Amino acid sequence: MKIYVGSLNPSKLTAVSEAFPEETVVEMDVDSKVSSQPFSDEETLEGAIHRARECAMASKADLGIGLEGGVMEIDDDLYLCNWGALVDQYENIYTAAGARIKLPEEVHEQMNKGLELGEVMEKYTQKNNVRKKEGAIGIFTNGQMNRDKMFQHIVTLLKGQWEYDQL
């Protein structure tokens, strides 16, 4: 089976490869059709679905998977949010969300100035490519969680829903 993933991000590709170890995972550079920094659950989910649909339309794809990271506000607090979508060859759509953690106020302030979370995290940590490595989730959980594991959790939820429908 060929699974196309709508991303070139190593964390997302690793997550899919770990959840589908026996399958061929192919990366695709596709547009999420949402802002580069999704700022709500709805926008983050929409981006994941767009990515998955684009991948599923690839002629040799059995499954298309889209994974999208974003942020969302609850009251006056900003939270990390993550969504995934799986689209099969019959255009069935499966969705799942991942962990949420509250982001520090200084990160919230920077993002309100229009910066993307990845940019803010690089300044905050003085590290390069945080979004392609541990991510904000890794920084703010002291390494107890990282983007690979967080997205793998979402992909596992997607895979389980899809497999259930195959019964």
Image (cartoon, rainbow, N blue to C red):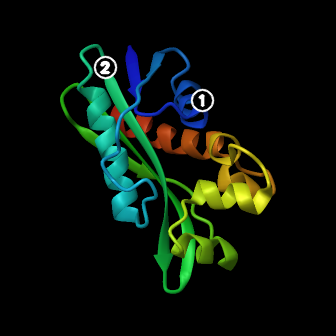
| Horizontal relation, residue 107 to residue 82: left or right | right
- Which quadrant: the C terminus? top left
Vertical placement of residue 143 versus 156, above or below: below
Along the viewing direction, whichever of 85 and 162 lies nearer the viewer: 85
- What residue would you read off at disc 2? 62
Chain-order first, disc 2 or disc 1:
1
Quadrant in the rendering for residue 60: top left
| Horizontal relation, residue 73 to residue 166: left or right | right
Q: Please give the name of the residue rendered at 59% of the width and 29% of the height, measured from the top-left corner.
A: 14
Q: Please give the name of the residue rendered at 57% of the width and 39% of the height, measured from the top-left corner.
A: 152
| Horizontal relation, residue 65 to residue 127: left or right | left
Q: Please give the name of the residue rendered at 55% of the width and 43% of the height, measured from the top-left corner.
A: 151
* Marks 2/1: CA–CA distance: 18 Å
Q: Please give the name of the residue rendered at 43% of the width and 53% of the height, measured from the top-left corner.
A: 36
| Horizontal relation, residue 23 to residue 61: left or right | right
For mark 2, give the secondary structure.
loop
Vertical placement of residue 17 versus 98, above or below: above
Vertical placement of residue 123 versus 58, above or below: below
What's under tag 2, amino acid-wise?
Asp
Provide residue 112's location: percent of width, then percent of height: 52, 75
What's under tag 1, amino acid-wise?
Thr
- What residue would you read off at disc 1? 14
Vertical placement of residue 10 versus 139, above or below: above
Q: Residues within 10 Å of mark 2 (few under 14, many from 20)?
A: some
Q: Is residue 165 visible?
A: no
Q: Residues within 10 Å of mark 1 (few under 14, many from 20)?
A: some
Q: Which mark is residue 124?
A: none
Provide residue 5's location: percent of width, then percent of height: 42, 29
Provide residue 147's location: percent of width, then percent of height: 63, 45
